Structures are given as C-alpha cells and as structure tokens.
C-alpha cells in the first residue's frame, strides 16, 4: 500500500483552510487545495478492499488540516465513509460526477468518450500542477489526475477561485 506519486506544494506551514478532492474507488486519487484554489498535494493509493479503505479514512482526512470542503466523485458507498466523518469535522461535502466537472474544465472535443476524457485529464492536470507551483510528478495515474481536476472544479464551486483558469489548447 505504498503511495505511487505525491506532490507537495506550499511554503512550509500547513494552510489554515483546505479542500480535499477524492476520485473514489479501491484505488483512490487524492488532491488537496488551499483557500487560494492552488493545488498543495496529490497522490494515488490502492487499498485492495473496502475493509482496508474503511480503516484508512480517519488518517486520510487527518492529512488535510483545516478541512473545509470535501469533493467526492465516484462510488457513493465508499464516499459515504468519507462524507460522514468529514461532516462530523464541520466540512462541507459536495458530490459531483465526471460529466459535471468535465463540462466545466474540458472542451467538448475532449469529452467525446471516456478514453478521450482520461487522456485530456492527464495533460490538464499537469497544467494545474504547473500553474499551482506543485512539484511535477514522475508519473501521474489517471485517478490522481482526475482528483486534481475534481479539486480545481471544487475550489471554484466553493468560491475559492472567482473563475477557472484557462490552460489553452493541448492542455
């Protein structure tokens, strides 16, 4: 259960407020944002079973000090494990689906199929990493890339970004 990639941005101290986006599944993609709407860190991790994931939820949420918003996309049963604990901690929980955040972030040509969208997500996530000043990954799994984009959409949704950045064609 090792972390396959991680980016840690920021300048030392933990942010006062944070947003955590999760692309749900037994392999989770995570992305954490600060209140300026900038990516702080991201990773992908495989848990192997619902029981192992359930045991990790507390620790995963604890990695986001000042958690104000949790953005979830994917398996509602797995997401419920996170949502209950996040609400107890006072965080707003927002559910989204791939169609919703992709429409906001990707041109229609990049959303024609799931495969097209996943390929576009990789390039767009790398643009978000660069824009945020987060360390570049050596590899970027699609679940981490999608979590980055879910988080960007979420930062806009909660009002931490007045508008979504435009990264241009080929992003």
Image (cartoon, helix red, strand yellow):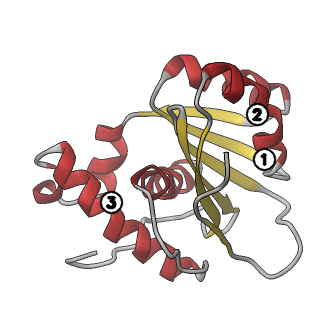
**The N terminus, quarter of image:** top right
Residue 102 position in % (x across, y down): 30, 49
The residue singled out by tag 3 in the image is 121
**Disc 3 and disc 1: Cα gap in Å?**
25 Å
Left or right: where does residue 105 sit relative to residue 50?
left
Check disc 3: other Cα within 10 Å, few if <14, some if 14-19, many if 20+.
many
Question: Secondary structure beneath disc 2?
Answer: helix
Residue under the point 46% across and 69% down: 139
**The C terminus, quarter of image:** bottom left
Disc number lying in front (1 or 2) = 2
Residue 106, disc: none
Q: Quadrant of residue 135?
A: bottom right
Residue 81 position in % (x across, y down): 68, 22
Residue under the point 21% across and 77% down: 170
- Pick the residue in front: 62 or 100: 62
User: Do the residues bearing badges 3 and 2 touch, measured as CB atoms within 8 Å?
Assistant: no
The residue singled out by tag 2 in the image is 56
**Disc 1 and disc 2: Cα gap in Å?**
17 Å
């Amino acid at each position: 259960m090792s972390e396959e990639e991680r980016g840690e941005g920021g300048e030392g101290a933990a942010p006062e407020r944070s947003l955590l986006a999760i692309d749900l599944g037994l392999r989770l993609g995570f992305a954490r944002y600060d209140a300026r709407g900038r990516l702080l860190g991201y990773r992908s991790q495989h848990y192997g079973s619902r029981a192992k994931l359930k045991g990790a939820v507390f620790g995963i949420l604890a990695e986001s000090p000042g958690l104000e918003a949790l953005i979830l996309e994917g398996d509602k049963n797995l997401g419920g494990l996170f949502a209950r604990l996040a609400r107890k901690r006072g965080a707003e929980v927002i559910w989204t689906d791939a169609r919703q955040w992709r429409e906001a972030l990707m041109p229609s040509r990049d959303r024609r199929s799931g495969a097209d969208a996943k390929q576009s997500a990789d390039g767009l996530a790398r643009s978000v990493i660069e824009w945020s000043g987060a360390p570049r990954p050596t590899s970027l799994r699609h679940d981490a890339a999608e979590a980055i984009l879910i988080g960007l959409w979420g930062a806009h949704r909660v009002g931490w970004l007045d508008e979504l950045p435009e990264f241009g064609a080929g992003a």
